[in-house]
């Protein structure tokens, strides 16, 4: 079971880490595998497209007037966040925190696409397993959270730090 949990955690970590690195460096993919990664400008374009007809006015206005208008700042925060999520999930260090932020990230994308005719489970296939990783304390399974717990005082050996 530990290997399966670690595989899911590390796999999600690689998704976030590779997309974060693509935004930071312009890296366009993992060759020779087909496909692409979402770079800095690509993420902005996706967000612009996702909210153009969003039915919740205050949300759409916030994204248009604040996030997209100041995308240099928000894009940098997005890049840092994706790299952080990726590192925490790959290493299993603060994995609960990384998985929780990753789930919130996927839930936001789900909400941003509220009025889009997309597959119903498009983003749920990301946030449901990430919430599962949070609830099971996935960093305890072949991750650094298990090792770190030995060095923490007993009152800190609990969720969200080490599950």
Image: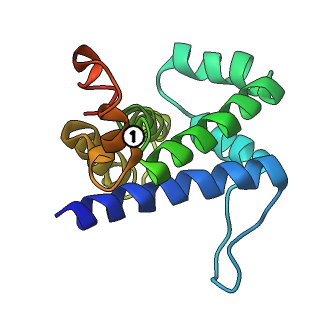
Residue, x 67% and y 35% (percent of image)?
Answer: 80
At 62% from the left and 16% from the top, the residue drawn is 62
Look at 44% across and 32% down and name the residue there.
Answer: 101
Picture mark count: 1
Q: Position of 156 compared to 79: left or right?
A: left
Residue 76 x/y as whole percent: 76, 32
Nearest the camera: 7 or 129? Answer: 7
Q: Secondary structure at mark 1?
A: helix
> The N terminus is located in which quarter?
bottom left
Q: Is residue 123 depicted above or below 7 in this figure?
A: above
Percent x, y of residue 110: 42, 41
Residue farthest to the left? Answer: 1
- Left or right relative to 132: residue 88: right
Q: Which residue is mark 1?
A: 95
Q: Residue at x 67, y 62 (%)?
A: 37
80 or 88, nearer to the observer: 88
Extreme residue in the bottom direction:
32
- Which of 61 and 14 lies nearest the eye of the viewer? 14
Q: Residue 31: percent from the left, percent from the top? A: 71, 81
Q: Quadrant of the C terminus?
A: top left
Q: Is residue 96 left or right of residue 17?
A: left
Q: Quadrant location of residue 4?
A: bottom left
- Residue 32 vertical position relative to residue 21 in the rendered view, above or below: below
> What is the crowding at mark 1: few (fewer than 14 residues within 10 Å), some, or many (at least 20)?
many
Q: Colour scheme in the image?
A: rainbow
Instruction: State the image coordinates of residue 67 (x, y, percent, origin top left).
Output: 70, 23
């Amino acid at each position: 079971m530990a290997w399966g949990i670690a595989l899911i955690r590390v796999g999600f970590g690689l998704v976030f880490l590779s997309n974060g690195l693509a935004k930071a460096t312009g890296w366009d993919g993992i060759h020779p595998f087909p496909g692409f990664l979402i770079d800095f400008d690509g993420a902005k374009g996706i967000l612009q497209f996702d909210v153009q007809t969003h039915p919740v006015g205050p949300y759409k206005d916030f994204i248009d007037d604040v996030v997209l208008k100041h995308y240099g700042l928000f894009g940098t925060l997005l890049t840092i966040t994706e790299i952080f999520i990726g590192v925490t999930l790959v290493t299993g260090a603060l994995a609960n925190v990384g998985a929780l932020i990753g789930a919130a990230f996927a839930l936001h994308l789900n909400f941003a696409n509220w009025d889009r005719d997309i597959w119903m489970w498009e983003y749920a296939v990301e946030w449901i397993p990430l919430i599962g990783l949070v609830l099971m304390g996935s960093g305890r399974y072949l991750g650094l959270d298990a090792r770190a717990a030995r060095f923490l005082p007993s009152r800190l050996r609990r969720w969200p730090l080490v599950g």
